[in-house]
Amino acid sequence: MSRSKLKTAAAPAYEIRRSPIHGTGVFAARDLRKGERIVEYRGELISKEESERRGLALMEKARRDGGASVYIFTLDDEWDLDGDQPDNDARLINHSCDPNCEAWNYDNRLFIEAARDIRKGEELGFNYGFSFDTWEDHPCRCGTAQCAGYIVAREEWPKLRRALAARERAAGKKAASRKIAGGRASGPSGGRSARGGSGSRS
């Protein structure tokens, strides 16, 4: 074969190693350009009914032994993709609230693509887009400046902020109630010193 016909194989786009976010992660093995296709999210095409059945089974497993990984991706109104298989490297990509990747559906095949230019060594991440309905089950560890605290689809962040604010207000009222109760139980020492003592213990 002549030298002119030889083709140089493209350098691998990613590598897999331990992640500071969670468990095992996927990292850029070279500089990646915005829009570059990085890896296919491989899996089994399943119906919505089967997806629901598997999801419920995983929830039961989580309740039973404290852990279950979910790799089911919504494709459209009819089909989902279950990526729980060993040759699906993309399942190891962690969530990020400030993602450098996006998932794109091409005729029910999912591909992870660069949402911006990515430097070699950066960990890859995309927004998992979880429903707000289960936000308390999915705390986020992405550590980005934009981290919402929980893994929720970005369009539902306003709902999340309201829920967090309501929880904070409720916690404040509960703490104030405990402090007042402590002051009443303090006897001759008086409410002021009792409240101060309670604060120093906490």
Image (tube, helix red, strand yellow):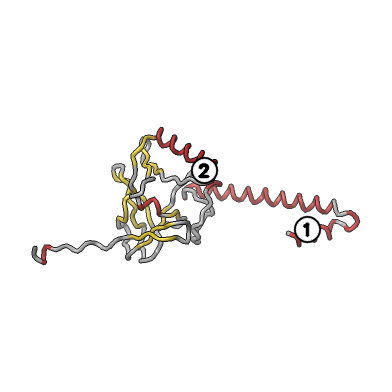
Residue furthest top in the image: 49
Q: Position of residue 100 (x, y in %)?
A: 39, 58
**What residue appears at the point 48 percent right and 45 percent down from the top-left corner?**
68
- Disc 2 and disc 1 in contact, CB within 8 angstroms: no
The x and y percentages for residue 86 are: 36, 49
Along the viewing direction, whichever of 16 and 194 lies nearer the viewer: 16
Q: Is residue 109 left or right of residue 169?
A: left
Question: Which residue, given by chain and number where applicable, does mark 1 sit on?
Answer: 198
Q: Is residue 54 left or right of residue 173?
A: left
Q: Which residue is tagged 2?
A: 62
Does 185 appear above or below 28? above
Q: Which mark is residue 64?
A: none
Q: Say which quarter of the image contains residue 7.
A: bottom left
**Where does the C terminus fall, quadrant-wise?**
bottom right
Q: Residues within 10 Å of mark 1 (few under 14, many from 20)?
A: some
* Residue type (three-letter) at the residue carrying disc 2: Ala
Say left or right for 141 vs 82. Answer: right
State the residue at coordinates (52%, 43%).
62
Picture residue at 67% right of the left edge, 48% below the top = 170
Give amino acid for label 1. Answer: Ser
Where disc 2 sits, the SS reads helix
Position of the N terminus by quadrant = bottom left
Residue at mark 2 to residue at mark 1: CA–CA distance: 38 Å
Q: Position of residue 67 (x, y in %)?
A: 51, 46
At horizontal 38% and vertical 66% (from top left) the residue drawn is 121
Disc on the earlier residue, 2 or 1: 2
